[in-house]
Image (cartoon, helix red, strand yellow):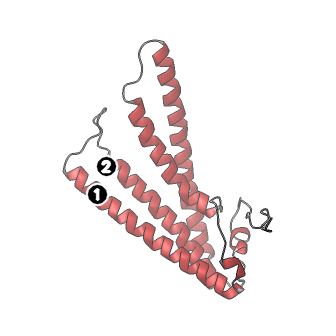
Amino acid sequence: MKYLVRVERWLCLAGLALAGVLLGALVLLSGLNVFGRMLGHPISGSYELSGFLGALIAALALADTQRKRGHVELDMFTSKYPPLVKRLVGAFNMLCGSLLLAVLAVQQVNRARRLLAAGELSETLRLPYPWLIYACAGALMLLACAYFTDAAYLITRRDPDTEALATEHRRGVVTSIHNEVDMTPR
C-alpha cells in the first residue's frame, strides 16, 4: 500500500510541477503580450495559447488537489452513518469516481485520435490541438489514480476514520472543513 501511495504522490507532484511550469509560461506570455500591445505589436494567437495553457494547468492540478483534500466536501448524510458503513461508502464513491474518470479519459483519447486523423487545427495559430486533448486525458488518468489510491486505502485500512487517510501517509494535506463549520440550526 505504501508503494501505491508513493507512486501516486510522485505522479501527482509531477503533474503539479508541469502545471507550475505552464503557469509560468502563461504569465510570461500574458506579460509579453501586454508589453507588445503597448509597442503596437501584440502576440498573434495569445488568447488561443492562453486558453490551451489554462486548460492544461487546471487539468494537471486536479490530481494533487484531490490528494491534498483541497476540493470542497459536502457531507449531509454520511456523517450519521456508522464508521464501517462510512468507510465502505467512501471507498465505493472513490471507485466509482475512478472508473468514471478512466472512461472519460478513454473517450477523450478516442476523440483526439479522430480529430488528429481528420487533420484538425486550431483557428488562429493552426496548431494540431488534439495533442492538448491527449494531455488532458492523461491528467484525468492522474485524477483517476488518486481516486483509486484513496479507495484502496479505505478498503484495506482497519481504522474507519477517512481523515486518517490524509494524515498518516500523505504530506501537506489541507485540513477538513468538518470541524470548522457550525451546523447548528439558527
Q: Quadrant of the C terminus?
A: bottom right
Q: Secondary structure at mark 1?
A: helix
Q: CA distance from mark 1 to mark 2?
A: 8 Å
Q: Quadrant of the N terminus?
A: bottom right
Q: Is residue 161 left or right of residue 94?
A: right
Are the residues tagged 1 and 2 within 8 Å (C-beta)?
Answer: yes
Q: Is residue 49 above or below residue 148?
A: above
At which x and y percent is residue 28?
52, 30
In front of the other: 154 or 16: 154
At which x and y percent is residue 31?
53, 25
Q: Is residue 147 left or right of residue 166?
A: left
Q: Which mark is residue 162?
A: none
At which x and y percent is residue 55?
45, 47
The residue positioned farthest toward the top in the image shown: 39
Disc 1 residue type (three-letter): Arg
Report the residue at 51% width, 53% height from top: 60
Q: Is residue 12 above or below residue 156?
A: above
Q: Is residue 181 above or below residue 4?
A: above
Report the residue at 51% width, 47% height from top: 57
Q: Which mark is residue 111?
A: 1
Report the residue at 56% width, 44% height from top: 20
Dot placed on the residue nearer the N-terminal end, 1 or 2: 1
The residue beneath circle 2 is: 130
| Total number of numbered discs in the rendering | 2
